[in-house]
Amino acid sequence: MTGPGGDTGEDTDRLGRGALVAFVREHGDGVLSTVGPDGGPQAAYLALAVTDDGVLVLDARASSRKVANLVGESRVAVVVGGRDGRTLQCEGVADVPEGAERERCAAAYRSAFPQFAGSLRDPGVVVVRVRLSWARFGDYRSAPPLVREAAGSELS
């Protein structure tokens, strides 16, 4: 996800799904923001996996604040990266998939984090899926920065 920036400081190229997937896999962690019961923001730093089709996946205790928050408001924001001057900011809708979809998401999580595979067998742990509706990649290591976005069908 590198390339020339324009005079405005933003690259007009769109963010491709493949580049998004590669960036999440390279980093493997990020911050998930949900809306609490009082309408206030709540954030959690966690391990993040991604399916080949750009769906973010994480595991969480079923009793956690983040999972409880998704019942009241399924819209979330996620930030990946930042330390090296590159970030991926995302927005989407999160849920707790079941059946075949849970297994598909769990497989992506196990592949990314084999050391955490055992947690997925714990009945107190759920898989959370985030289907993205918007994403912006920014590489701020040079001036002007490179910024690429994707939305809607570009992400599905």
Image (tube, rainbow, N blue to C red):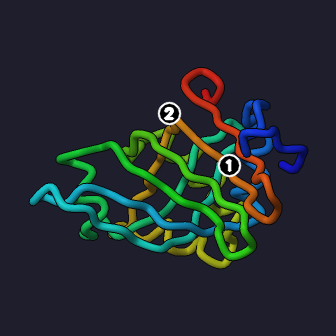
Mark number displayed over residue 137? 1
- Secondary structure at badge 1 equals strand
* Disc nearest the viewer among 2 and 1: 1
Work out how far the residue at label 2 is from the one at label 1, CA to CA, in angstroms.
Answer: 14 Å
Mark number displayed over residue 133? 2
Considering depth in this image, is 105 or 20 the residue closer to the camera? Answer: 20
Instruction: Please tell me in which quadrant of the rendered image residue 104 appears.
Output: top right
Q: Residues within 10 Å of mark 2 (few under 14, many from 20)?
A: some
- Secondary structure at badge 2 equals strand
Measuring from the top left, give residue 2's x and y in whole percent. 87, 50
Res. 128 visible in picture:
yes
Q: Amino acid at mark 2?
A: Ser
11 on left or right of 137: right
Measuring from the top left, give residue 114's x and y in whole percent. 69, 71
83 on left or right of 70: right
- Residue at x 78% of width, y 52% of height: 144
Instruction: Please tell me in which quadrant of the rendered image residue 38 appears.
Output: bottom left
- Residue at x 39% of width, y 45% of height: 94
Q: Residues within 10 Å of mark 1 (few under 14, many from 20)?
A: many
Considering depth in this image, is 79 or 105 the residue closer to the camera? Answer: 79
